[in-house]
Image: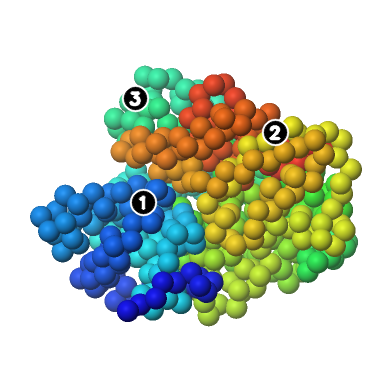
Amino acid sequence: MAREGNLEAPTRHPLDWQNPAFYDQAALYQEMERVFEICHGCRRCVSLCQSFPTLFDLVDASETMEIDGVKKEDYWQVVEHCYLCDLCYMTKCPYVPPHEWNLDFPHLMLRAKAVHFRKGQTKLRDKLLTSTDLVGKFCGIPIVAPTVNTVNKIGAMRKLLENVAGIHAEAWLPEFSSQSLRSRLRVLPDDTPAEPAAGTTGKVALFATCYMNRNEPGPGEDLVAVFEHNGIPVSLVPTEQCCGMPKLELGDLEAVRRAKEKNIPVLARLVDAGWDLTALIPSCVLMFKQELPLMFPDDPEVQKVKDAFYDPFEYLMLRHKAGRLATDFKQGLGKVSYHAACHQRVQNIGQKTRECLSLIPDTTVDIIERCSGHDGTYAVKREFHPVAMKIVKPVVNRINQNAPDHYGSDCAMAGHHIGHARADGSAPEHPITLLRKAYGL
């Protein structure tokens, strides 16, 4: 009889995506049946996302009330609700490696998405939504950006967009900035002086990310102000493409490889020149710290970038341990409701944002460790938006009960989804923005 796991730290096996057997649908179905049988007998993950209730409903409605009574084609209903948040793997499942049952639900869903994509069954809408560089480049044109932003606020146009493109008429959509973050920040020379501490070099290259570059550049400027106030020079990564996370979630692994081949050489050169790396979107950080190393475990440049990539608040708290974090805060923040993003939680760095904000006098931080259900694209799709609103409801209830002076998330899109669900006219604030406010910068 197999023992339960979680007595040892979860370990992740490399993703065998370049093996032709990875795309064998019969083998995929066999593995899905094995894993779903275990999940059905456990059911601990039922509250995390819609994948598990969907699976358990299929089982309970079948003739046998077991996995063997579920049609294989219905497995895809489970797959389409998984947005690879990784929380089942990291926080709930007792059978992850090194347990002998070797259960990795997110990577099994990723494999299914890759099979689906390779068979040409992916919707055009989903391909476009995950083409963040292409969409951002067009919609960020100075003349186009205000037009797109205006159209997205017109109810009749949103209803048309829903009917034509499958984008839910009531979902929050990000605005586009006509002045990108890349046009606002500078690239510093390699010989920029810095003060190393606590394993950090003391100078940081910022990976702008598609969203912060084209949609919400303000927090990027806030990060530069906060870091430079702490004696940490910030340079902009000279060139970049999307990190690849949207295409990973789509199952387009070749597109992930292409993005990797553009980004990794640039980032590795920066590491060689003495720069540490960071990004303001937790999913982008996770891409370089976990997903690319699992896809390319034998690439030394990928490993080099992984070792130099930090969450912004992880970086600040490392410096704090060495006495290198300024604590000359000018104002308290009062009550802060802080939503911990899923892709930050699975980095296994601890509650660094909460720890950092808690250093501010006259500030109390209520941390909410529950998924918002946004995922960048899941919450805007016509068929999934109602589910995303259901998933975010407990987060909203917690914030409303706390009645905070400020609320937000390290994932800016999750923050806006929460604000949209609150529907009270309030606006989320990124934690780095709150830190800058506390410094009075």
Residue closest to the eye, 241 or 97: 97
Dot 1 or dot 3, earlier in sequence: 1
x and y, in percent, of residue 226 in the image: 79, 45
Residue marked by disc 2: 335
Residue flagged by tag 1: what amino acid is it?
Val
Tag 2: amino acid: Lys
**Where residue 90 sits: x, y (%)?**
49, 62
Q: How far apart are marks 3 and 2 (CA)?
A: 38 Å
**In the image, what residue occupies the spot 26% across and 69% down?**
34
Closer to us: 92 or 328 = 92
Judged from the image, the secondary structure of the residue bearing numbered disc 2 is: strand
**Left or right: residue 209 compared with residue 151:** right
Of residue 115 and residue 360, the one placed in the foreground of this image is 360
Q: Indicate which label's residue lies in the foreground, 3 or 2.
A: 2
Q: Do the residues labelled 3 and 2 touch (CB within 8 Å)?
A: no
> Do labels 2 and 1 touch, CB within 8 Å?
no
Residue named by callout 1: 46
